[in-house]
Amino acid sequence: MVDKKSIFTEKQNNYYSLVKFAFPGVKPGSIIEYHYVSIMKHFGGLDEWKFQSDLPTLKSSYIVQVIPRAEFTYTVQKASQLRIHVNNMQGEGKVYFEMNNVPALRIEPYMDAQRDYIQKVIFQLSGFASTNGGKLSINTTWKSLALELMSDKQYGAQLDKDLKIEDLKSLCVPESSEQGRMRAIYEFVKKNIKWNGYDGKYAPDGLKAVWDRRKGSAGEMNLLLVNFLKSANIVAHPVLVAERDFGKIDSTYPYIDRFNKTVAFAIADGKQYLLDVTQENCPAGLIPFQLLGTTAFLVDKKIYNLIKISPGIKFYKNTVSITGEMNDKGLVIAEAHVKSFDYARQVRLDEISKDRRKFITEKFENPYEGLSVDSFLIMTPKNDSVPLEQIVRYKQQFNESGGFMFLNSNLFTGLEKNPFTSSVRFTNVNFGYPYDITVEEKIKIPAGIKVDLPENKMMISDDNKIQAARQVSFENGELIIVIRFVQTTTLVTTNAYNDMKEFYKKMINMLNEPIILKPQH
């Protein structure tokens, strides 16, 4: 038994607290058993129940009891080979769920959200039975959900209010096009409202309060954006989204809790935009990375609709140009110019702003033996159409063994190791966006060193969605290496995992094949 003194409650925010408890004497093979009762005053706390975690589960059971006259619906998500016991005790207003011998769910590279695969049951309030025998349904269709949200004083009722923001009116005067006004308003909100770190779907205190305090949740900020866009005569609607790491929605039933935030949808000069002002380095026109490959719900009384979000023509694109010189001891002193476009630009700006030193270490030093960065400079883009430029000056020492030096030419591609090594994959591989990587290296080799050129190679996957090539030449004392990697597939199912794993294994081996240098004494 656990002593009550070992149980702690830690406040997370105004709505949630975290209960922590310690089990003394736990060791490999121990069975941990606990149970608890939670009583809610409203249905906001009727969260999903997870039978599975990162530890094997011997038994997981859950009893839900709803107040009289209330009705709810539920959906069970589980693997076909696992069994679940459900006992609907209608006379008591209870439902009992139980699963046994549930294996652990491990984290795998490039996996979808863990909650998309975890064994669980999902709930939502669906209606009330009245005292006269009638029934009031609650959001049992997507249409009813849209109508409810657009009438909600914390949601749709806020969108047409005149907030009397004088700075906004003057901001739009010099912009003659809808796209110009839209981009100006998008940047205006990002600049003037600080994100508090929470997602959220609603604006509980109203949009005027959000503007006055200059701070808000993602839902509040994006609803404010929709309001501003509409006031500038730009077609705009709120959109409920479930981000990639939050998990997929169930398109057959309007479970509003399957969405974690509200973003904005706009049409400017006939072009559609999906906007999230909490994404500081995501320009208008680039779909936020966390929304790629997801399904969203456009909220409007007339044109409500589920929409599939794809990356379109935007890639994670890097071009790298390296120039350097090697001495007769195998030390290369070089400079790399990196240009990052689209998703590479956004991701790298996010990483650099979060931890510059960690970014340098993980991208340019740790993956490469003997390499150290002397200086790192970024050219901050002046507008969102300009790539992020990085200038890296570095040294790399190649060891001599048996009279040979082995030069690694696979630099700064992000393809140094095969991330797919598991023999069995339980989840889909979801890259999110397509890739386009080009690296061109020019290294001067001192006289008297013989270069053993490897064979030029190209690999193409059976479905033509992954291509990799490496070309090596030696001209006038200069070693020239060109590496190109293009991957257009963004989602690989578990059925196709083995083929992709083998392709990646061969591709990484090809790219890592060393160039052999032999000093002539």
Image (cartoon, rainbow, N blue to C red):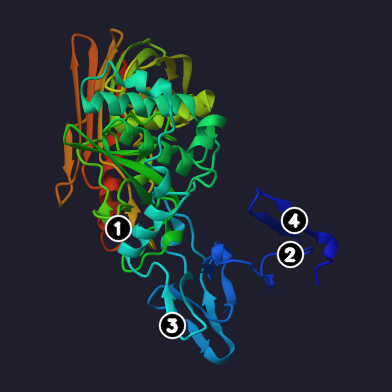
User: 122 or 68, which is in the foreground?
Assistant: 68
Which three-letter amino acid code belongs to the residue tagged 3?
Answer: Gly
Point out the frontmost of discs 2 and 4: 4
- Mark 3 surroundings within 10 Å by alpha-carbon count, few (fewer than 14), some (14 through 19), many (20 or more): few
Which three-letter amino acid code belongs to the residue tagged 2?
Answer: Val
Sequence order check, earlier mark of 4 and 1: 4
Percent position of residue 283, x then y: 33, 29
Which three-letter amino acid code belongs to the residue tagged 1?
Answer: Tyr
Q: Which residue is mark 1?
A: 497
Sequence order check, earlier mark of 1 and 2: 2
Who's the residue at 75% across and 56% down the image?
A: 9
Who's the residue at 17% across and 35% down the image?
A: 457
Q: Which residue is mark 2?
A: 26
Which three-letter amino acid code belongs to the residue tagged 4?
Answer: Thr
Quick check: marks 3 and 1 in contact, CB under 8 Å?
no
Percent position of residue 185, x then y: 35, 27
Sequence order check, earlier mark of 3 and 4: 4
* Alpha carbon distance from label 3 to label 4: 42 Å
Q: Give the side of residue 490 with respect to residue 121, left or right.
A: left
In the rendered image of this protein, does residue 323 appear above or below residue 256?
Answer: above
Q: Secondary structure at mark 1?
A: helix
Sequence order check, earlier mark of 3 and 1: 3
Q: Can you say which quadrant of the picture contains the C terminus? A: top left
Q: Give the side of residue 473 with respect to residue 122, left or right.
A: left
- Residue 311 visible, this angle: yes
Q: Can you say which quadrant of the picture contains the N terminus? A: bottom right
User: 208 or 380, which is in the foreground?
Assistant: 208
Q: Give the side of residue 269 with respect to residue 8, left or right.
A: left
Q: Which residue is mark 3?
A: 134
In the rendered image of this protein, does residue 473 appear above or below residue 161?
Answer: above
Quick check: marks 2 and 3 in contact, CB under 8 Å?
no
User: 262 or 294, which is in the foreground?
Assistant: 262
